[in-house]
Amino acid sequence: MPKEVIKKAIEKNFDYHESVDSEVWDTIQGGQQPKITLITCSDSRVSGHIFGKDMINHVFHIRNIGNQIENNFGSVDYGINHLHTPILLILGHTDCGAVKASQSDFSGESDEIKKELYPLYFNLRLVSKNTDMGSHADVTKLVQENVDLQVKDAIKRYTTEGQYVVGAIFDIHSQLGDKPGRVIITNINGETDIEELKEHPLLSDLESSMKSVVVNRV
């Protein structure tokens, strides 16, 4: 099994290498110039290609369980203060295992896992009462709450003129729309009203029809 896994990984990299124009590699020899600092969960269903396969040098990607900002302040600081990305995107996802685990009994986990789950536990314990962890709808509400809280923490540290903190959910289970696989914007700089979000200056270049699909909350 391990041999098959590494073989497939290497073969996929060969395919990837062949699919990318050689000029792309020439343009990044001098360093990176991303436009977004992205915090996502480590969940393998949240692919690095959800914004397209041509996003090389566009996204400074940070991952941890539960897409938590506190766990990676150093990396986020680097993305915003040194790489000067104008957007910090905090992306949760439906059916987040870290969110569910944080509101369950995780006493048997390693100290390292406990350390990462405790902030989620304390942040979500009040809103998680009467939550059915087997319900995608209930868990999505907790995921959204977690994203809102991460955005709130980020705003205290990073919002300056021209800097945006965006909260969103990668909808794997069609909880915020009619199709799985979309990134749904739920929060911009603390604004959570759907109609206000649709009119937010950051989204002014989007067609109204697209806004109606990608802006939503549970």
Image (cartoon, rainbow, N blue to C red):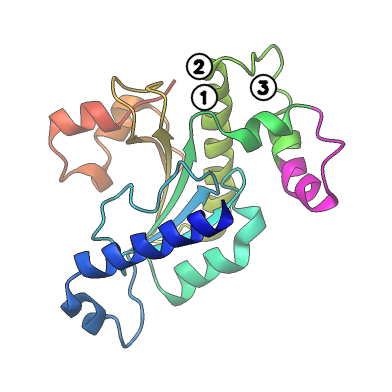
> Within 10 angstroms of label 3, few (less than 14), some, or many (20 or more) residues?
few
Q: Which residue is mark 3?
A: 127
Whether residue 54 sits left or right of residue 142 in the image: it is left
Residue placed under numbered mark 2 in the picture? 137
Label 2: few (<14), some (14–19) or many (≥20) C-alpha neighbours in 10 Å: some
Q: Is residue 116 magenta?
A: yes
Which residue occupies 44% across, 44% down? 46
Magenta stretch: dominant SS?
A: helix
Q: Choose mark 2 or mark 3, whichever is in front.
A: 2
Disc 3 marks a residue whose amino acid type is Val
Report helix, strand or loop for mark 3.
Answer: loop
Q: Provide the residue span drawn in magenta.
A: 105-119
- Confirm whether residue 162 shows in the render: no
Q: Is residue 113 magenta?
A: yes
Q: In the image, what residue occupies the spot 51% across and 72% down?
A: 78
1 and 2 marks in contact (CB < 8 Å) = yes
- Residue at image point 49% right, 55% down: 4
